[in-house]
Amino acid sequence: MTKPNGSSATLPLLEVSNVTAFYGDLQALFGINLKIHAGEIVTLIGSNGAGKTTILRIISGVKHAASGGVGFDGYNVTRLSAHKMVALGVSHVPEGRQVFPFLTVKENLSLGAYTRRARPHLKQLMEEQLALFPRLAERMNQLAGTLSGGEQQMLAIARGLMAQPKLLLLDEPSLGLAPKVADEVFEKIQEVRQKGITMLIVEQNVVAGLSIGDRGYVIQHGAVLLEDTAANLLKNETVRAAYLGL
């Protein structure tokens, strides 16, 4: 892990530079470039199979880019493993929540604080997450697999926050949730933002995803089609026609 030239204070918190990726012989990403500055919420939108999840997987170290680079917090992290990325301050909440169904809520949260930085603060971190997600406090000894979909999503986000991330990656946080429950999840995401945590969100609900974001990228066929402020993307005719049916 090496730092690039220049002061990290002048750099984006995250910079993805000309990244390509493959699954076998199938190319999934074609020269992706994106930046996120500390404190921002940035939203990725695009159709299924556009490459959005692959971008998150490369940032979090779950998958490595075939070419190009990833910089995080002033470091070149292009080839770092997922557990080292967590230690650096990147938490990934994957699509489908993926809580540990046969462990309790408390045990799931505890597993989120396994890093050397977070472990000494386990009690405080637990209290912070339960204050943010009071419903989890009522279900601490309940098996995660018996929670509702919305509660599991809140648990997945809370578990990601237990690692004290600088950057939180959220993949389809509203997927499979009733509209009212999805609205509650988005409200919690905005509360997380107030804690100063930067977020990159992949979201199928274009209006909701852009409404809570500062900026957005439209991903199409593994490439960036558009980049703009979230407000401008909501008004963009191409976005409205392709994703809002307007």
Image (cartoon, helix red, strand yellow):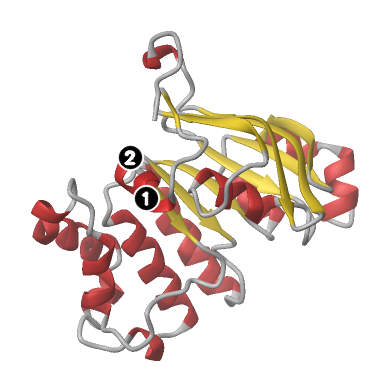
Q: Earlier in the sequence, mark 2 or mark 1?
A: 2
Residue 43: quarter of image: top right
Q: Residues within 10 Å of mark 2 (few under 14, many from 20)?
A: many
| Residue at left offset 83%, top offset 44% | 239
Q: Which mark is residue 178?
A: none
210 to 229, vertically: above or below = below
Q: Amino acid at mark 2?
A: Leu
Q: Looking at numbered disc 1 in the image, what kind of residue is underneath it?
A: Glu
Q: Residue at x 39, y 62 (%)?
A: 157
Q: Which mark is residue 88?
A: 2
Specify whether 191 is left or right of 210: left
Q: Residue furthest top?
A: 6
Percent coordinates x, y for residue 74 in the rendering: 41, 22
Q: Could you say which is closer to the camera, residue 39 or residue 80? A: 80
Question: Of the residues tagged 2 and 1, which is closer to the observer?
Answer: 2
Do the residues under discs 2 and 1 have CB atoms within 8 angstroms?
Answer: no
Of 94 and 29, nearer the camera is: 29
**SS category of the residue bearing label 2:** helix
Q: Nearer the viewer, residue 92 or 23?
A: 23
Q: Counting other residues with Cα less than 10 Å from the Cα at mark 1, is it few (<14), some (14-19), or many (20 or more)?
A: few
Residue 4: x and y, percent?
Answer: 45, 16
The x and y percentages for residue 160 are: 36, 58
Rendered location of residue 221, percent (x, y): 84, 48
Q: Which residue is mark 1?
A: 191
User: Which quarter of the rendered picture does the N terminus lie within?
Assistant: top left
Q: Would residue 211 be found to the left or right of residue 225 on screen? A: left
Q: Secondary structure at mark 1?
A: helix
